[in-house]
Amino acid sequence: MIKVLKRIDPMPFAKILGITYGFLSLIFLLFMSISFLMPSSNKKPAVFVMLFIAVVYPILGFVFGFIMACIYNFSAGLIGGIEIEVEDKN
């Protein structure tokens, strides 16, 4: 059965992307924290980057998720939505 995704509610989509980007930032931070185990003379730039990723990345995910949903809704109104094939499991 083929269905068409005609509209995405921007706020829930933005929340999902914010959470997703938050989890991705944790993965990035895990790999970046490994760099702290290596000898280095100046760790301040790395700390700044880690804080930036931890705070700003999820916020950007939320904002861009909201914008992307709005753009999708506008585009779907012009040319139609994305066709997806679904199957009922009974």
Image (tube, rainbow, N blue to C red):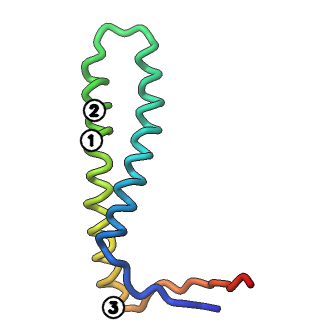
Nearest to viewer (mark 1 / mark 3): 1
Above or below for 72 versus 2: above
Which numbered disc covers residue 4? none
Tag 2 secondary structure: helix
| Residue at point 74%, 84% (across, down) | 90
Residue 82 location (% of width, % of height): 48, 84
The local crowd at label 2, few if under 14, some if 14 to 19, many if 20 or more residues have their Cα within 10 Å, is: few
Q: Residue furthest front?
A: 90
**Disc 1 to disc 3, how far (Cα)?**
34 Å
Looking at the image, tell me whether mark 2 or mark 3 is earlier in sequence order: 2
Looking at the image, tell me whether mark 1 or mark 3 is earlier in sequence order: 1
Above or below for 26 versus 75: above
The residue tagged 3 is 77
Q: Quadrant of residue 44?
A: top left
Residue type, mark 2 in image: Leu
| Residue at point 39%, 91% (across, down) | 79
- Is mark 1 in CB contact (under 8 Å) with mark 2? yes
| Residue at point 25%, 28% (across, down) | 48
| Residue at point 29%, 59% (across, down) | 62
The local crowd at label 1, few if under 14, some if 14 to 19, many if 20 or more residues have their Cα within 10 Å, is: few
